[in-house]
Image (cartoon, helix red, strand yellow):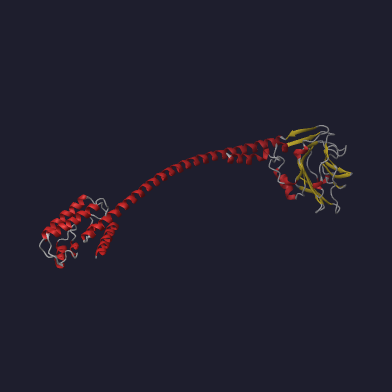
């Protein structure tokens, strides 16, 4: 909403701002012997000024006055046809250079500064004449400014619009820019900061004679066209804002869905971590029991049998345990009465390389070079029963098998 209001303000500021209100479009029509006279604060203009505005001369008499500032003498005079352009009582007669036809709107601008000492007069952005003023001479304050009359003579008898006095000496390019934009320009005055006497304040002053407010049809049409363009831009901006709002809503919904998914994932991860923690605890307990069992039996176990495809990366089951037990009992029964020499064990491993029969276990000092008995067979079977009971449900990965080997080795080291 704030963004929308900002766009509205930006688009319509020329129409509702201090210098862009409809009063900028208001012209004053002076009949004969009518004028506006008052005493403004001229102190900001003593060393520099520019008086610019739009006028339309419709009178038939000679010497028609646009503006006069009087303080003991006529400090400043501007006549419609350029016949009398005066500053500090010094006149320029420029009517021979004035070529605007009667009844046509045109722009006039009178500029001066103490620094340049150049009093210049422009019509429609073209310099008609310039005159140097006396060094050190400044504009006197405390006088009367009159629009439309020279004292009680030379009435204007025409229309004027947006006449302002600036506390700066406008350059020829700045004046040309004003003329180029035209009298119907509704943009904020580029020189607003230096505008001292303002048109929208002049039109509110007390009037003598018949002075009527008029609006220029051409400007109203242009204003309406410009307004329509602004409205179209505003509508376009509103559509884009609505589209953006829809996209933001959709994005917010996606983000909310993602947050829900992440929450569920986090809960699943927490549950998995809890499960892993329990599994680790159970595995540690199993390893401790295996370590105690092997130490108690003073025996070793060949864990390499679990590296076969039959067991590796498989979860150890009671069926696996029974398979190994049956295979071992069958082989052990046939060994009873034989001396377990190194040569015999190698022959067994060579001629009967059954993965379920851990022949390398027989290299233990408990069996190597001993006559194998049924008691030895039962002992190994009992050891296996105790071990297999602890392994049921364990996934026999390489890491687990290496850990089992480590426990066995450390158990035997502790008992040697």
Tell me which corner region of the image, top left, top right, bottom left or bottom right, holds residue 8. top right
Percent x, y of residue 338: 11, 64
The quarter in which the N terminus is drawn is top right
Q: Is residue 22 left or right of residue 65?
A: left
Q: Is residue 154 above or below residue 193?
A: above
Answer left or right for 130 relative to 216: right
Which of the pair 325/187 is nearer the observer? Answer: 325
Is 217 left, or right, of 391 in this rendering? right
For residue 293, say whether it is visible. yes
Up-down relation of residue 341 to residue 172 (above or below): below
Q: Which residue: 57% across, 40% down? A: 237
Q: Nearer the viewer, residue 258 or 251?
A: 258
Q: Is residue 228 above or below residue 132?
A: above
Q: Camera-side residue: 292 or 360?
A: 292
The percent coordinates of residue 91 (x first, y second) are 86, 47
- Which of the 4 quarters of the picture holds residue 108? top right
Q: Quadrant of the C terminus?
A: bottom left
Please, is residue 412 above or below residue 275 in the view?
below
Drawn side of residue 411 relative to residue 93, left or right = left
Residue 407: where, in percent of width, then height? 27, 60
């Amino acid at each position: 909403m704030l963004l929308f209001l900002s766009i509205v303000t930006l688009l319509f500021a020329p129409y509702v701002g201090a210098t862009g209100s409809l009063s900028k479009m208001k012209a004053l029509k002076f009949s004969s012997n009518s004028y506006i006279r008052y005493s403004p604060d001229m102190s900001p203009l003593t060393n520099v000024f520019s008086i610019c505005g739009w006028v339309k001369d419709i009178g038939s008499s000679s010497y028609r006055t646009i503006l006069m500032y009087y303080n003991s003498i006529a400090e400043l005079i501007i006549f419609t046809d350029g016949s009398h352009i005066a500053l500090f009582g010094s006149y320029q007669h420029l009517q021979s250079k004035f070529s605007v036809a009667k009844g046509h709107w045109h722009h006039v601008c009178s500029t001066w500064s103490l620094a340049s000492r150049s009093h210049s007069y422009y019509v429609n952005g073209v310099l008609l004449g310039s005159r140097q003023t006396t060094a050190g001479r400044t504009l006197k304050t405390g006088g009367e400014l009159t629009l439309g009359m020279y004292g009680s003579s030379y009435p204007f008898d025409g229309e004027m619009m947006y006449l302002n006095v600036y506390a700066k000496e406008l350059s020829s390019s700045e004046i040309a820019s004003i003329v180029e934009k035209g009298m119907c320009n509704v943009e904020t005055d580029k020189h607003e900061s230096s505008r001292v006497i303002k048109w929208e304040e002049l039109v509110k002053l007390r009037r003598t004679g018949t002075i009527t407010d008029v609006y220029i049809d051409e400007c109203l049409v242009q204003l309406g066209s410009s307004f329509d363009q602004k409205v179209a831009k505003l509508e376009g901006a509103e559509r884009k804002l609505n589209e953006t709002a829809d996209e933001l809503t959709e994005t917010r919904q996606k983000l909310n869905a993602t947050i829900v998914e992440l929450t569920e994932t986090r809960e699943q991860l927490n549950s998995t971590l809890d499960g892993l923690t329990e599994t680790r605890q159970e595995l540690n307990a199993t390893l401790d029991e295996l370590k105690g069992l092997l130490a108690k039996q003073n025996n070793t176990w060949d864990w390499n049998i679990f590296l076969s495809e039959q067991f590796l990366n498989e979860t150890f089951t009671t069926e696996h345990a029974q398979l190994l037990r049956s295979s071992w009992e069958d082989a052990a029964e046939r060994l009873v009465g034989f001396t377990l020499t190194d040569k015999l064990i190698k022959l067994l491993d060579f001629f009967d390389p059954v993965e379920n029969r851990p022949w390398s276990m027989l290299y233990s000092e408990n069996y190597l070079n001993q006559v194998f008995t049924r008691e030895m067979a039962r002992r190994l079977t009992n050891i296996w029963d105790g071990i297999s009971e602890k392994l049921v449900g364990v996934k026999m990965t390489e890491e687990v098998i290496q850990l089992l080997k480590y426990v066995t080795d450390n158990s035997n080291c502790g008992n040697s």
